[in-house]
């Protein structure tokens, strides 16, 4: 599902390489493509991206229908996030568009305050986890920042570092996650299950040298 809008609603960026790029216009899913598993798990309501439904992933493709368009290496990604009770979600980077299943490429940053999974918000899923206690609460907006610079990955929640991890030169990904490594790629937002409701707004990113 790819929604295209007129130019006034297009994504915006300044000319300088260090400018923030608006990735979500608050009107529709321009610049994003949901895979065909359950595309209705994503919709826009009152300027907010609502994630509510069975498993599906929403991939950032920028202003092109070509799913190879956005291939990022170093970046600073930001969004405001809010979860409802028992919700689970995830934010992928250095990933690639896939028609179904959990994305096999790249890393996942966890979104989970009170879901039964012990891995909580602010962790790098199955690599550098935040266990048992989330740094934030359900029902409250919080800032989620992901910074990748070379082999260095930093996750911040409300400005506080929750993950500071450097991928080793001899890195061996977790079992059954062979693609969990740095390379280049795009972003994806996860719809985890029908009981998980997560909200996103102010989604933007900045390319780093």
Image: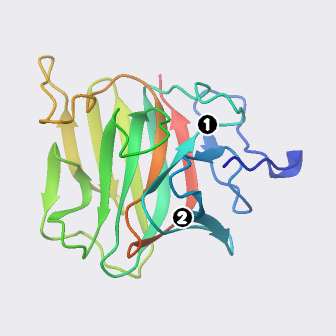
Above or below residue 87? Residue 148 is: above
Give the percent coordinates (x, y) of residue 74. 43, 28
CB-based contact (under 8 Å), mark 1 and mark 2: no
Above or below residue 129? Residue 205 is: above
Q: Nearer the viewer, mark 1 or mark 2?
A: 2
Res. 148 image quadrant: top left
Total labels drawn: 2
Give the percent coordinates (x, y) of residue 152. 26, 31
Give the percent coordinates (x, y) of residue 16. 66, 28
Give me the residue at 13% from left, 36% from top: 174
Res. 127 image quadrant: top left
Reading the chain from its start, which is encountered first: label 1 or label 2? Answer: 2
Q: Which residue is mark 2?
A: 41
Residue 14 visible in image: yes
Give the percent coordinates (x, y) of residue 123. 23, 53
Q: Secondary structure at mark 1?
A: loop
Q: Please indicate whether residue 66 sits to the left or right of residue 168 in the image.
A: right
- Local packing at callout 1 (Cα closer than 10 Å; few below 14, some 14-19, many 20+) is many
Q: Please indicate whether residue 68 sits to the left or right of residue 128 in the image.
A: right
Closer-to-camera residue (157/176): 176
How is the rendered protein coloured? rainbow
Give me the residue at 33% from left, 82% from top: 85
Q: Please indicate whether residue 9 sits to the left or right of residue 192 in the image.
A: right
Q: Which residue is mark 1?
A: 61
- Local packing at callout 2 (Cα closer than 10 Å; few below 14, some 14-19, many 20+) is many
Give me the residue at 70% from left, 38% from top: 13
Give me the residue at 15% from left, 46% from top: 128
Q: Secondary structure at mark 2?
A: helix
Residue 22 visible in image: no
Q: Can you tell which mark lies on residue 81?
A: none
The residue lying furthest to the top in this view is 169
CA–CA distance in space, label 1 to label 2: 18 Å
């Amino acid at each position: 599902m790819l929604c295209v809008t007129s130019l006034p609603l297009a994504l915006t960026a300044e000319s300088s390489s260090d400018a923030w790029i608006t990735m979500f216009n608050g009107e529709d899913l321009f610049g994003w493509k949901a895979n065909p598993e359950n595309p209705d798990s994503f919709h826009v309501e009152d300027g907010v991206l609502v994630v509510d439904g069975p498993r599906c992933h929403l991939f950032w493709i920028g202003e092109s229908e070509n799913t190879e368009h956005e291939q990022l290496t170093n970046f600073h990604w930001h969004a405001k996030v809010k979860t409802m009770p028992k919700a689970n979600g995830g934010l992928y980077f250095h990933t690639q568009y896939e028609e179904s299943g959990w994305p096999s490429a790249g890393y996942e940053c966890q979104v989970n305050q009170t879901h039964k999974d012990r891995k909580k918000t602010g962790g790098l899923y199955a690599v550098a986890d935040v266990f048992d206690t989330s740094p934030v609460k359900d029902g409250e907006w919080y800032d989620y920042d992901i910074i990748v610079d070379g082999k260095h990955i930093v996750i911040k929640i409300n400005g506080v570092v929750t993950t500071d991890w450097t991928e080793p030169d001899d890195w061996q990904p977790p079992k059954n996650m062979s693609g969990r490594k740095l390379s280049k790629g795009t972003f994806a937002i996860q719809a985890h299950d029908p009981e998980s409701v997560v909200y996103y707004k102010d989604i933007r990113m900045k390319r780093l040298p």
